[in-house]
Amino acid sequence: MATFTEQRKLEMYRFFLVAFDAAPGATDLGQLQQAVEAGLSTQEIVNVFTTKSQFLAEYPSSLLNSEFASKLVNRVIGDAASTEAKAKAVSDITAALWGGMSRGDVIFTVFGNLASRELDPSKAGYNPADPYLGVAKQLANMVKVASYYSETLKRSTTELSVLQDAVARVNSFSDVSTAQSMDRLIAGFDAARQLDMYRFFLVAFDAAPGQTYWGQLKSAVESGLSTRDIVNIFTSKAAFQAVYPDSLSNQVFAQRLVESVAKDSVSGTVKAQAVGDVLSALGTGMSRGDVIFTVFGNLAARPTDPSAAGYNGTDPYLAVAKQLANKVAVAKYYTETLLGSTVQLAELQAVIARTNAQSDVSSPDALRALVTNLESGRIQDGYISGATVFADTDGDGILDPGEASTTSDAQGNFKLSGALGSLVATGGIDISTNLPHTTVLKAPAGASVVNPLTTVVAALTDTGVPVAQAQAQVAQALGIPLGVSLTSFDPLAAAASLTASDAQKSIAVSVYMASSWVANVFSQSAAADIFASGIGGSRGMASGG
């Protein structure tokens, strides 16, 4: 009886991966072992297997030679070689088939050629210019994962789609050096990793990820990165730096993070303790990404169901854990059911802004009620009647089918139900001049006024700046007193009020002057650029300078 040596086993893995783009699993590996021990050569085994129903389901006999070649090349190479290299491979295989080689012989030759390539740059024969070097590295990595899956994990399924999924995320760059890294590649973007990503995004950004960021997180997971690795990578990106710049002291970072995560769900004493804990962790050398990873991990570990083992009704952070769990449900609904696709952080933050530890997240209707707003307010650049007002759910600035919209009344007021996204107002008549209003006005979600100043605030939030920070930046640039909420303060109403104090009317005048300056002196995009660069304040327009 022939022996199932390590070399023959390696050949069986290569064959199965090239033929089926799959790990064999314990069951099929056992059949291949039996074939080897029966005395069959590797080439004979390949030709036997390529007559079986499992292979013919993937590569029917009815396929033309060129069709078989294209399908095989696309499966084996994927993105690991150039289009030109793939076309050359298709041509070579098609020619070999027309020359009389069986499809089994072609597969035997393909994995044999790939296996013969030297992958170690320090050894003779290594050729970095080889157009198929990436394919050979990819196959070698897939062999390691397939071996781990079939022999260490002893997965015995014969369902081809499951066996294919086991190696679907492996490429030439995959880390296959440890059991943990291969576990991540095999598991892929499973339910547990998805939950990790939602928790991370909510703790780091206080926001739902939406489809675009979700796709990036999914790609990161499927590349084999650990959750901790992903958190540390994302916390180096511009979106995170806009919220937590590296220039922040550890004290300010800790305070801002704790406030963002806890909000009103714990006492000031508990928040102070949490800030102290974060500072201690940073003091030991933990990165800010590691701190965020630890925070959501600790919250996720807390049972929130009173009937569950380990539930502690007196835990001071229990409400924070419940709040995070509810926000995960809302973020998941927005991202996966509503397919929200905006990348504007302010809008993604608005999605979960109404969710707390007591929120009802038990049904789609309850989730939708938390996600969408009943927006009301006034269009003001002078008051604008007859303007089209809509919630820009996808962030493209265009009223699309399905986006909540309405028309402002004779005094510029509007009510918008089911709103999701920032507010946009177009058209209408300026009732102070009776002339058409041609400027597009915007405001962050939740604003009760839409005017030139909120348009600049919205432009800044589009770059990832939080709403409160954007308002402060605009106010400082224009000399508006700090503390004035630009997204809710109506200067015309305040100036005309019979009950407003002289100080309040003075503020109203300064805000209106700033708004008029933005509208009349600069285009909105130019104004946004000036405020973003921090030089607008030199004009001092709000104070009459």
Image (cartoon, rainbow, N blue to C red):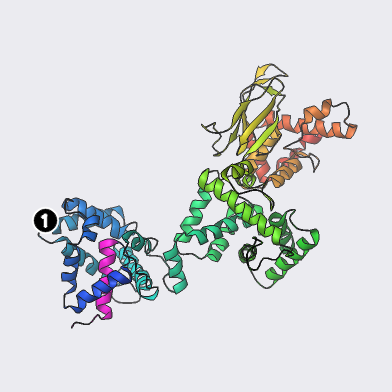
Q: Quadrant of the N terminus?
A: bottom left
Asked whether, in this view, residue 502 is left or right of residue 71, the answer is right
Give x and y (percent) for residue 185. Answer: 43, 65
> Which residue sits furthest top?
434
Q: Is residue 15 visible?
A: yes
Pick whichever, 446 or 290, lies toward us: 446
Q: Residue at x 48, y 52 (%)?
A: 215
Mark 1 residue crowding within 10 angstroms, few (<14) / some (14–19) / many (20+): few
- In the image, residue 199 sits, relative to residue 536, either above or below, namely below
Count of marks overlaid on the render: 1
Q: Secondary structure at mark 1?
A: helix
Q: Residue at x 20, y 79 (%)?
A: 37
Pick whichever, 120 or 339, lies toward us: 339
Circle 1 residue = 98
Asked whether, in this view, residue 49 is left or right of residue 376, the answer is left
Amino acid of disc 1: Trp
Q: Is residue 525 visible?
A: no
Asked whether, in this view, residue 106 is left or right of residue 536, the answer is left
Report the magenta stretch's main SS. Answer: helix
Q: Is residue 302 magenta?
A: no
Dividing the picture into quarters, in which one does residue 2 lie?
bottom left
What span is in magenta? 1-20
Asked whether, in this view, residue 542 is left or right of residue 404, the answer is right
> Which residue sits furthest front?
307
Give x and y (percent) for residue 405. Answer: 59, 29
Q: Is residue 12 magenta?
A: yes
Give x and y (percent) for residue 305. Answer: 64, 60
Give x and y (percent) for residue 359. Answer: 67, 49
